[in-house]
Amino acid sequence: MIASKTLSIGYNPVGASAVVSKLKQFCEANALDSEFNFQMCVVTAEAVNNIIQHSPKSANDGFIKVKFDYCADHLTISLVYWCPEFTPPENAHCPDTDSLSGRGWHIIQSYMDNVLYHHNVGMNTLVLTKNTSIHHDA
């Protein structure tokens, strides 16, 4: 492992903004190019905002644990949070262009090389992995 960062954020827009800001700094510090950085920030914002939006009010007192792990050939973003289980679509399709929502899973699956979801007794884990081998700044 080359670099790792762990954060705990609240179930609120301030927490979502903070994690995206930290991820941007993390990607820059590890010389990952701006397009890669953009994609990872979009995916992370989408995932965290969906967690916040779809979690029950009781979860709002807790925290979302976010971890970035950068290795020689990939970046992994792990999110651990408490809320009821859900079934993410295996192959999310982009909704009709007239729809104002429903693009999150499509964006996440389009930008990431691997998306894993696991639920165990109220705790959800979302693991997002992207190959970094062609995404380094010179």
Image (cartoon, rainbow, N blue to C red):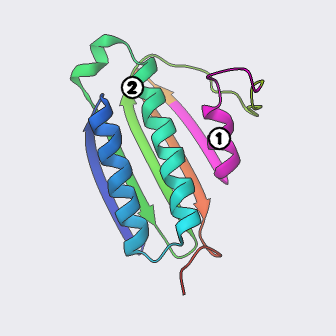
Q: Residue placed at 32% from the left, 60% from the top?
A: 5
Q: Residue placed at 67% from the left, 43% from the top?
A: 109
Q: Is residue 35 above or below residue 43?
A: below
- x and y, in percent, of residue 101 in the image: 61, 23
Q: Is residue 75 above or below residue 54?
A: below
Disc 2 marks which amino acid? Ile
Q: Residue placed at 27% from the left, 39% from the top?
A: 9
Residue placed under numbered mark 2 in the picture: 52
> Which is nearer the eye, 128 or 11?
11
- x and y, in percent, of residue 38 in the image: 53, 57
Query: Could you tell whether 14 is left or right of 70 in the image?
Result: left
Which of pointers 1 and 2 lies earlier in the amino acid sequence?
A: 2
Q: Quadrant of the C terminus?
A: bottom right
Give the spatial CA distance, label 1 vs label 2.
17 Å
Q: What element carries label 2?
A: helix
Residue placed under numbered mark 1 in the picture: 107
